[in-house]
Amino acid sequence: MESAVKISHTSALILQTISSGYVYGFDIMEATGLPSGTIYPALRRLEKDSFVRGDWEDRKAAIRQDRPPRRYYKMTRQGKDALAGAMERYPLLTRLAPQEKVARR
Amino acid sequence: MWQCTALLRTASLLVPRPERASWYKEWYGEIWHWLHFLAESDRLNTQSVLELLRHCWGAFPDAAWHRFDRKKTVRAFEEVPRDPRFCLGAIGFAFVFLVLITGLAPTIRAGFRSLPFQQPDRLAYLSFQSNFSQYDEEYLFRNVGEWGPGSKSAESAAAYSWRPAALVTPDGVLRRNTARVSPNMFELLGNKAAMGRLFTSGDTAACPSCVVISHGLWSDEFKSDKSIVGKTITLDDHPKTVIGVLPENFVFIYPEVSVWELPHWGYTSHNLAWRTGAVLRMKPHVSLALTNDEFRGFARKEGYDRTQLESFNSRAHQGTKLYLFFSVLSLFGGIALGSSRLGGAKTRKIKLSFAHTARWWGFFAGKTLLLLAICFVGALEITGRVSIMMTGSVHPLVGPFSTWLFLVTAMIALSWSLHDQSRRCRLCLKRLGNEASVGMPSYLFLGWWGTELVCSDGHGMLHVPEMKSSWQEFDQWVSLDESWKPLFETEEPVHAP
């Protein structure tokens, strides 16, 4: 049987934050309190290893509102598994994790 | 906003070109939204803008992530210093740096250069070895002036007496060595002025306050002033007139002298014996031994103790020859020591090819030579400069001190070179790592205990006993076969921001 993928505490916190509904870089940064120099490289690694998937929002919608498009991050199935494993390894993570986001700004 | 854009544009240069546009678009979008959120929520103030700028700095690590693989970079930082090329490069860089900061090692270059005098093989140097005696300058100059014409072995003789003095320059007051010399000194040496003129026989009476300055002083302190001849400088509160500048290659045997003046008659002036002496030009085909006998006789008759006569050539080159001899001796000693210490460890378990053996000893010889060269340049150049900085002159202890400094640093360098060599892979010459203590110290008589080091490329493992049970016990090198390879392969990066 393949052993569970081990991820670092920071990566787990970011995955947890994304699963709580914080889906773009600055949002995650604000929710976790981690600096941008940590968040973005971590997101790149998570995306490279298929734990999250980054998608550009609909370009037409952005143009309609006269603003640049954003890149949203979404957890993959592998990411969910990794987070579940991490929650067992880091039981205190739930206390650090931000509350569920009610509505996207 | 423009500040953020500028930061992002700069950081984006780190991102590989195919990903750059998408990377910039994401960061720009994030900042745009952040800024507008601040403006809409009426929170746009200096503090929030500064905070936003601070976040923009985060674009640099993110961009760097795109350019460099973290795992590979960290591994490179760990591995590169182990590489033999890094070792040689670092030592070579230190050597070049040292040579450059000393001004291309002028003392050593002077040691190899032919002396800037006419027929230097006929020049000799009479020094007084007494450390505590003081001689009357007027008496010395008159004595030496009489020895020359009365000598059977020398054509002429000139006395000198040097001391540090306070020299006023455009940049302030400097402590520099000045020498009083007989007026025929430069004539005897056979030098011509680079600018103006040098002393002549009649100058003692006609131009008692005239001075000649060294090329170094003229170029460094007077900024190569073309009109220096005829100008007045102040030396120990006395005005002196510059009549000439010595050529650039002129170097007095000892010490470095910046200002040359004529002796002063009519008042008593004493100087330490080791700061005084005489220069002789021997007659053609006269041996140094004959001149030595004659002039030591003159000196003894006038009450000068412990005199020594040396030829200019031997005086100028003896230090360099001694150091070179010791460097070569150290290198061969190191190789001999290395072959006994390292050779045993090397050949016990594996047979190295000729190419590997040549590479092994070539690296050791190159590394040791470079280290000895650093010691050589450092000892010869730095001590003199430190002495000038601290005392304003080249102290007489500089010579012995630089020799001892060279000997001590050469020993340290050789020891380190041997130790470093003993901790390198016998195949790739990489410095071994992953030190592990093995065995139980208290079981000394029952089992082996010591340290094991391994080559990061998996070529082999070195067993270093903590205590050698006999003089025949060496460090043991064990080569690792192909079955060990997977253990040393680079792992895929794990998630560790």
Image (spheres, rainbow, N blue to C red):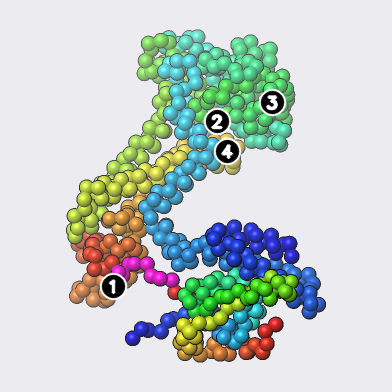
N-terminal-most mark, 1 or 2:
2
Vertical relation: B124 (above or below) B134: above
Say what amino acid the circle numbered 4 marks: Ile
In which quadrant of the rendered view does residue B291 lie? top left
Q: CA distance from mark 1 to mark 4?
A: 53 Å
- SS of the residue under disc 2: loop
N-terminal-most mark, 1 or 4:
4
Q: What is the magenta range?
A: B486-493
The residue tagged 4 is: B388
The residue tagged 1 is: B438
Q: Position of residue B22 (x, y in %)?
A: 59, 66
N-terminal-most mark, 3 or 4:
3
Q: CA distance from mark 1 to mark 3?
A: 71 Å
Q: Position of residue B423 (x, y in %)?
A: 32, 58
Vertical relation: B409 (above or below) B164: below
Say what amino acid the circle numbered 1 marks: Val
Q: Chain of mark 1?
A: B
Q: Residues within 10 Å of mark 4 (few under 14, many from 20)?
A: some
